[in-house]
Amino acid sequence: MIALPQAAPKVAKLTALGIGVALMATACGGGSTPSATESSAAAGGIACPAPSATAGATSSSTETGNVPAATTTTPTPLKIGSLLPTTGSLAFLGPPEIAGVNLGVKEVNAAGGVLGKPIQVVHRDSGDTKTDIATQSTTALLGQNVSAIIGAASSGVSKTVINQITGAGVIQFSPANTSPDFTTWDDKGLYWRTAPSDVLQGKVLGNYMATCGAQTVGMIVLNDAYGTGLAKNVKAAFEAAGGQVVAEELFNEGDSQFSSQVDKVIAAKPDAIALITFDQAKSIVPLITGKGIKATQLFMVDGNTSDYSKDFKAGTLKGAQGTIPGTFAKDDFKKKLLAIDPALKDYSYAGESYDAVNLIALASEAAKSTKGVEIAKQLKAVSEGGEKCTDFASCVTLLRNGKDIDYDGESGPVTFSDAGDPTEASIGIYEYGDDNKYTPSREEFGKL
């Protein structure tokens, strides 16, 4: 059993990071009854803020009229490829991302397509870093003359294909890459993403654990670009908030045994444990809870915040929390996604994938071209500075009427930097229930 302080000797000091986490840290409660501002996590010695009353707002729809015909037409339809996971350690992210892409394509074509032609999409599996599937899929997509490739989900996978894609003059547009390394990558202006760098998710998670009263944290971290990059930012934020990381254990993609890492973290007796993994959490969580650690002491991230209702017995994760970049999926957006894929259980990065399609399509209209290099030149312009619009039909109507546009999408406000990164974003914080499913708790908005 982790030794939790009965009364914390000091309250974790929060720093002003400009990301909306301005809640006062709460001392770990011994046997006290949780107050109205605390979640049920207080029973495990961690007293996190209660869910926001506005978590999971229900509507994001916009009304659009008739879309005017394109003033410039193309002999070559816009063709988009997707490089998203249907196998491997991030396969659970594939269905919502693919559904987001397909919904975007469906709505673009319902509005008349791009430059007078319906757009086309070709899907290929990205696999993970244990295989060479991504390289093979990228070669196949480039052979079909796509102008843009949406993917990969994994930062590690993207690193294996980014030079291949951008070197061919094709846009790589990831809905889920969060490694800070891409900000400075020599990508010829062709790499873009709707997911914010883990500089932001790391700040939010590190500060949030301090807000919950944790003064010491242990971390189990995937040893790749995603895991170590996110861990670095979580550690920096937590330490800046007055906390201490007392254990940081790494493992490699493809590992199947995690007892050593779990034992070393537990031996350090942290107040909270951060799991920065992909689906390895399915093996790690039972090892941790089997040693008496309370789920309320577990904090997860976008790589493993998933539906575990069929993986663990009821109550295993009750009170655990996780962060996912992006605003909460709205109810009407979920209904549209379920019409595309009725089997969906997770909605992670569906909005970012949907927005990627819309932004590529709108930039193609603005460029009056379906060439990747020309589309890339307009992506920043359609994301900022003009008249606000939130779907393809309303945005393309403005463009065809000679207006400048500022697209804000299902993932939240989208404003690109010169490096192709979002300059502002929300991080959703989710809490697990007795059914081992996660629900929205609160959102933190920040700028990068």
Image (cartoon, helix red, strand yellow):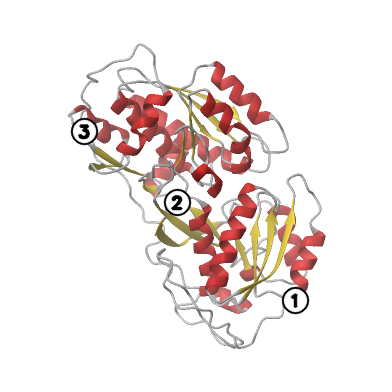
Three-letter amino acid code of the residue under disc 2: Gly
Q: Is residue 308 visible?
A: no
Sooner in the amino-acid sequence: mark 2 or mark 3: 2
Residue 288 lies, in percent from the top left, at 74, 65
Sooner in the amino-acid sequence: mark 1 or mark 2: 1
Please say if 196 is above or below 134. below
Can you identify the residue that label 2 sits on? 326
Residue 75 lies, in percent from the top left, at 35, 11
Residue 85 lies, in percent from the top left, at 61, 36
Can you identify the residue that label 1 sits on? 1
How far apart are the two marked residues, 2 and 3, measured between alpha carbons? 26 Å
Q: Which residue is pictured at 56% across the width and 65% down the height?
A: 236
How far apart are the two marked residues, 3 and 1, measured between alpha carbons? 60 Å
Q: Quadrant of residue 403?
A: top left
Task: Tell me the tag on residue 288.
Answer: none
Instruction: Name the element at disc 2.
Output: loop
Circle count: 3
Between residues 311 and 280, which one lies in front from this camera angle?
280
Three-letter amino acid code of the residue under disc 3: Leu
Q: Which residue is pictured at 48% across the width and 82% down the height?
A: 35
Can you identify the residue that label 3 sits on? 398
Please say if 88 is above or below 431. above
Between residues 321 and 78, which one lies in front from this camera angle?
78
Q: Is residue 423 left or right of residue 89?
A: left
Disc number lying in front (1 or 2): 2
Instruction: Name the element at disc 1.
Output: loop
Three-letter amino acid code of the residue under disc 1: Met
Crowding at dot 1, Cα within 10 Å, few <14 / some 14-19 / many 20+, comes out as few
